[in-house]
Amino acid sequence: MLIQLLGALSMYTELRSTWHSSPLANTFDGSSMAQPQVRTAGSTSRFFQFKLVLLGESAVGKSSLVLRFVKDQFEEFRESTIGAAFLTQTISLDDQTTIKFEIWDTAGQERYKSLAPMYYRNAQAAVVVYDITQSASLDKAKSWVKELQRQASDSIIIALAGNKADLNESRAVPTQEAAAYAKEAGLLFFETSAKSNENVSELFEAIARKLPLDASLNRGRAGGAPARGVDLSRGQAAQQGGGVWVFFIFIPLISAGALNGAIDPQTL
Ligand SMILES: Nc1nc2c(ncn2[C@@H]2O[C@H](COP(=O)(O)OP(=O)(O)O)[C@@H](O)[C@H]2O)c(=O)[nH]1
Ligand SMILES: [Mg+2]
């Protein structure tokens, strides 16, 4: 299929951590992330790397959840994400187990929808977000879940996040309703608040715990493919400065085949 470079408009990179190498070259090649990577440092340390994508209607708080998770910050008035943003965060599950999330925070607007498969392709985990004060956003979340279950990796771990839980007085989606749906669809479920920092790290940690961390599953790659940009001997601790923001203000390489259809010209 003919791949056209329609435009790389601009890119802003803000490195705020000890990561020395740009993740971009590594990360944009989805194939390199098809499997978790494992590296053994010493006899017991294990390092895993997973690609995670956030999906959901615009303004439900996807970027805010990521900002809270990666930088422990909240902004009352965030600019909408354009295209997608890429970030990383590293957490320690226990003394021996380090998980690096490579996070693709997608734009929720309908006009970017056709780009989504590029971000969820090869993702090992997805967080589908809705806003507990907007019942239509749960419908939208359900349609993302359907699409993921049809088109993403069979083994993808999907979490449903009912965000803005701090706005309980304006609640439109009862917890029970969303929980029952999540159970039926086989999803992890959390009500979160990026604002009040409720269940944010719990959400990502639950995903990490559900991911296949059995080293035997990954042994084929251990020692073979080197883990990227991480020196375990530096002992990166949970939630510490793992964030690398690479804002994409770009229209990526577009392949009609890869994206299941023509690109809406409005995307440009
Ligand atoms: N009250 C409240 N507002 C939130 C929360 N998360 C995000 N917001 C606000 O909702 C708006 C949209 O958030 P944003 O993260 O840009 O949504 P996105 O389009 O899904 O990425 C912003 O004004 C945020 O400040 C939350 O947990 N509680
Ligand atoms: Mg956003």
Image (tube, rainbow, N blue to C red):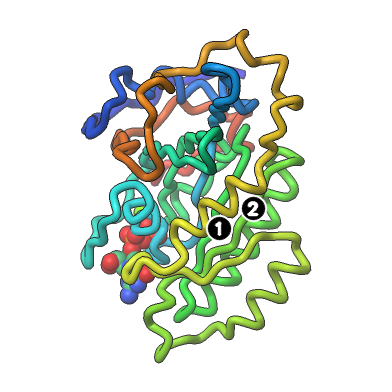
Tag 2: amino acid: Ile
Q: Nearest the camera: 21 or 173? A: 21
**Side of 185 relative to 143 (left or right):** right
Tag 1: amino acid: Val
Q: Nearest the camera: 140 or 197? A: 197
The residue depicted at 29 percent of the width and 38 percent of the height is 241
Crowding around mark 1 (Cα neighbors within 10 Å: few <14, some 14 to 19, many 20+) is many
Q: Is mark 1 within 8 Å of ligand 1?
A: no
Which labelled disc corresponds to residue 158? 2
Q: Which residue is mark 1?
A: 128
**Side of 209 relative to 149 (left or right):** left
One can see residue 9 in this view: yes
Callout 1 secondary element? strand
Q: Is residue 137 above or below residue 235?
A: below
Label 2 to label 1: alpha-carbon separation: 7 Å
User: x and y percent of residue 73 in the render?
Assistant: 26, 57
Q: Quadrant of residue 16?
A: top left
The residue depicted at 47 percent of the width and 86 percent of the height is 171
Q: Earlier in the sequence, mark 2 or mark 1?
A: 1
Q: Is mark 2 within 8 Å of ligand 1?
A: no
Q: Nearest the camera: 37 or 77? A: 37
Q: Are marks 2 and 1 in contact (CB under 8 Å)?
A: yes
Crowding around mark 2 (Cα neighbors within 10 Å: few <14, some 14 to 19, many 20+) is many
**Side of 244 relative to 27 (left or right):** left
Residue closest to the far bottom: 169
Q: Is residue 137 above or below residue 149?
A: below
The residue depicted at 51 percent of the width and 21 percent of the height is 29
